[in-house]
Image (cartoon, rainbow, N blue to C red):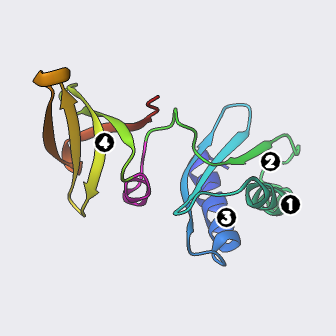
Amino acid sequence: MNNETIISTVTQKLEAIIQDNPTVFLVDIKIKPTNNIKVFVDGDNGVGIDRLVSYNRQLYKQLEEMAIFPEGDFSLEVSSPGLSEPLKLHRQYVKNTGRFVEVVLLDGTQVEGKLLTVTGEEITLEEEKGKGKKKETVQHIIAFSNIKTTKIQIKF
């Protein structure tokens, strides 16, 4: 079975498992050459560890019963995407409104700022430039079509 087929199967199984909670959604599935399946699940209000463990157990049992890997040599990790993972879905942008993000545009330009608004086509970032009396606030409207990656930034 190739990776696309496995990803499709895992997607169908997981979506059936999480369908009882409309605030939870699948973000991404990655398969490493060692048959390590990484499933990233997020929620509009976050996803608790207990829920992730439950999803992991249910999905593992189903994949084991299907014998996708004949030798049974696979591992499964169901987690929420960490801060190192870029935002992939519109829903993740909405969830993170108000947080600081770093956006890399298609041309390689980086823009950091507070995510103010999210529409179907674009995001608005508020960037603070300068310090003290020279401090100014600049708003950037960025089309999703111009975004290469967006990552959450932690500000202290």
Q: CA–CA distance between discs 3 and 2?
A: 17 Å
Q: Earlier in the sequence, mark 3 or mark 2?
A: 3
Q: Which mark is residue 61?
A: 1
Q: Residues within 10 Å of mark 3 (few under 14, many from 20)?
A: many
Distance, label 1 to label 3, CA atoms, is: 12 Å
Residue 130 in sight here: no
Q: At numbered mark 3, what does the secondary structure look like: helix, strand or loop?
A: helix
Name the residue nearer the viewer: 67 or 96.
Answer: 96
Q: Residue furthest bottom?
A: 20
- Mark 1 and mark 4: span between their CA atoms? 41 Å
Foreground disc of the pair 4, 3: 4
Element class at badge 2? loop
User: For the magenta stretch, what is the residue range?
Assistant: 87-96
Tell me if residue 38 is in the magenta stretch.
no
Considering only order in the chain, which callout, 3 or 4, is on the residue closer to the N terminus? 3
Residue 140 appears in view: yes
Q: Identify the main secondary structure in magenta.
A: helix
Q: Pointer 4 and pointer 2: residues touching (CB < 8 Å)?
A: no
Numbered tag placed on residue 69 in the rendering: 2
Which comes sooner in the sequence, label 1 or label 3? 3
- Density class for disc 2 (Cα within 10 Å; few <14, some 14-19, many ≥20) is few
Disc 3 marks a residue whose amino acid type is Leu
Q: Disc 1 or 2, which lies upstream in sequence?
A: 1
Between marks 4 and 2 in the image, the one whose residue lies nearer the viewer: 4
Residue named by callout 4 = 114
Q: Which mark is residue 14?
A: 3
